Amino acid sequence: MSIDALRGFDMLMIIFAERFFFALNLGAHTPLTGLMATQFNHPEWFGFHIYDVIMPLFLFIVGVVIPFSIGKRLREAPTKAYLYPHMFKRFVILFILGWIVQGNLLDLDINKFQIFSNTLQAIAVGYFFTVVAYIHLNRNGRYILFGLCLVVYAMLLTLPNVPGVGRSELLPDKNFALYVDHLILGRFNDGLQYTWILSGIGFTATTLAGLFAGEILQSAFLPKKKILYLVGFGVLGILAGLVWGIWHPIIKKIWTSSFVLVQGGIGFLLMALFYWLIDVKKYKKWAFPLKVIGMNAITAYVMSHVFNMSQIASYFVFGLQQYVGAYYELTRTVAGFLIFYFFLWYLYKNKTFIKI
């Protein structure tokens, strides 16, 4: 249950927290609400905010689940190759959903289309290569691959020359990863400073980190030992990332290797906390709403981007604007989330779980 609840917590941050703190600051406009609104927005370039935990945590949890879901398939499959159709299918569906959510597929306008520009597509890449590693490499081999991902990607960001710029630098428009995106994606890139193709190495490393956490949870260790391992890896990852960040800065937009380590460490600590509270101490009631969201995470993610729930809520709460004044946007945001949550609860109650 802790995995489902943590996934639901991550989705809650995506579908509600960002809009909530923005709307709260719009009404209250105090230093504290301003700080929280800033924390739920991405930094311009260097460093990270609370909001930057969301996307890597999504990838991390995908990795956590792999030993449970793919492990069972692997035991039942006649050959390892038998798993590939399922992997390819999931990869393709995630990419298409990414096109719908952020690639402007529903505009039916080729001039607005973006090939690689969304969290779901990052998950597709991280999931596919992590599963390949899981079914073909032993545990030590996967640890080595994780290290290689970090080192190789760091080298690709700092060693090559960028035509017309010179030596690659970890700066906007001066890094090799962005050059590769422009070169390969051409007019179909997202036009922003985010990078995707070479960053796939970092996406894979983040998902691998989740896989390591999942293997700890699946192990025969006593719960106390599992928690110690999760916390230990978490602290080690954060410290290593912060130290490496002195020379190789933490930058979410290009998913630097130091960013992978820090966010992976945070993922381990959150997994330890949720596992301890829910599965060890059996404090489950508080986590039920998170489980409802987490059991239909992909549905929640896609719907929150395709449908404007605040706008839908306006049809129900428009009469309150005269009473709440500057807090009307906050009222719409909370009402929209409650409508959305009711829909997810209805799916959960009827045991309808949309998976790919």
Image: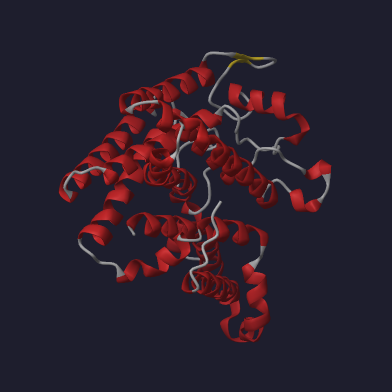
Residue drawn at (32%, 35%) of the image? 237
- Where is 205 relative to 66, above or below? above
Residue 284 visible to the viewer = yes
**At which x and y percent is residue 27?**
54, 71
**At which x and y percent is residue 97?**
65, 49
Residue drawn at (79%, 52%) of the image? 107
- Where is 280 relative to 254, above or below? below
Q: Nearer the viewer, residue 205 or 345?
A: 345
Q: Nearer the viewer, residue 195 or 81?
A: 81
- Where is 112 relative to 139, above or below? below
**At which x and y percent is residue 223?**
19, 50
- Residue 49 appears left or right of 109: left
Which quadrant, please, contains the N terminus? bottom left
Residue 118 visible to the viewer = no
Residue drawn at (31%, 24%) of the image? 140
Q: Nearer the viewer, residue 25 or 107?
A: 107
Residue drawn at (60%, 21%) of the image? 176
- Residue 258 appears left or right of 201: left
**At which x and y percent is residue 180?**
65, 23
Quadrant of residue 314 within the rendered picture = bottom right
- How many circles with numbers are drawn on the protein? 0
Quadrant of residue 290 within the rendered picture = bottom left
